[in-house]
Image (cartoon, helix red, strand yellow):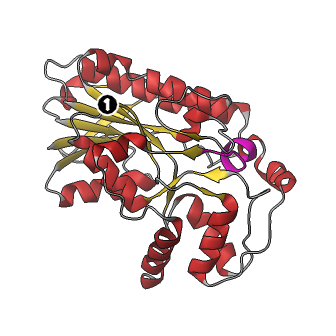
Amino acid sequence: MNIAVTGATGLIGSALVPALRRGGHTVRLLVRRPPRDNFEISWNPARGTLDPAALTGLDAVVHLAGAGVGDHRWTDSYKRQILASRVAGTTLLADALAGLDGPPRVLLSASAVGWYGDTDGRAVDESALPGTGFLAEVTAAWEAATATAEHAGMRVCHLRSGVVLAARGGALAKQLPLFRLGAGGRLGSGRQWLSWLTLADEIAAISFLLTAEAVHGPVNLTSPEPVTNAAFTRALGSALRRPAILPVPAVALRVVLGEFADEGVLVSQRVIPRVLIEAGFAFSHPGIGAALDAIITDADSDR
């Protein structure tokens, strides 16, 4: 397949692109600078610039670009950047694809389990209505921005990713140094549910969805076995063979992280990947213990 990818330098994109190329696909990258070769396409979502002719001949697009949700404290200006980077970029891309005489067959567009808001202890799947809060509002607008591509007949999947676990990026990489020192512990009460997926299964799921012709609409990219934060903490301590008994109080998280603490760390999201399960996707690491063991083993082998 001839596949274009946005957000190729992020945690997911930097692993997806080489995986697709190893699978024999031709991959073109959308970049925010002049292209260096024929495998790059220049675009600027902030300025609304993208030459639709550069997208001619694509079979699929994987759209991952967007400002990092946990990269900065949530000031009003950064929240606007989070929203704009997703909606403006997605709208620009969807409109350009929809205007082609022969648009790609499929658009896999990033989203997040933030759609569901706080589900407390309630398990939800793709049929659930949107929750409340800033991230729920962002994901609703983000997904709606693909409308022109859908109207043009493209198969559109919204990739509602949970917390993607990897040793060299994302939330887990930030936690590992403390846990390796035996200074890790649960966050807040530890009762909040965590919906997660290994980076390897994230990449495998995206690759699977490229050719899963019957699948469209929202798709939860999460393990079928979400866990509480306390259970995750125990599993991570066990994988590292370190104690994990130093809790971080919720009030301290709110002081350090501000609004993001409640929506990104203390939020409880128990999300089930019903669509992937019913489509026959095989998870390599459905359980948190084996998943963390595999991630830590790979990381240690590279040290």
Residue located at (54% from left, 58% from top): 170
Task: Note whether residue 81 is visible.
Answer: no
* Vertical order, 223 against 106 (above or below): below
| Percent coordinates x, y for residue 42 in the rendering | 31, 36
Residue receiving disc 1 = 216
Amino acid at dot 1: His
Which sits in the foreground, 20 or 163? 163
* Vertical order, 249 against 185 (above or below): above
User: In the image, 204: left or right of 294?
Assistant: left
| Image quadrant in which you'd find residue 275 | top left
Q: Residue 265 magenta-drawn? A: yes
User: In the image, 138: left or right of 168?
Assistant: right
Which sits in the foreground, 75 or 144? 144
User: Is disc 1 placed on a helix, strand or loop?
Assistant: loop
* Vertical order, 17 against 138 (above or below): below
Residue located at (19% from left, 29% from top): 104
Q: Quadrant of the N terminus?
A: top left
* Vertical order, 281 against 89 (above or below): below
Task: Note whether residue 116 is visible.
Answer: yes
| Percent coordinates x, y for residue 21 in the rendering | 20, 56
Which sits in the foreground, 141 or 161? 161
Q: Please provide the residue range marked out in magenta.
A: 261-269
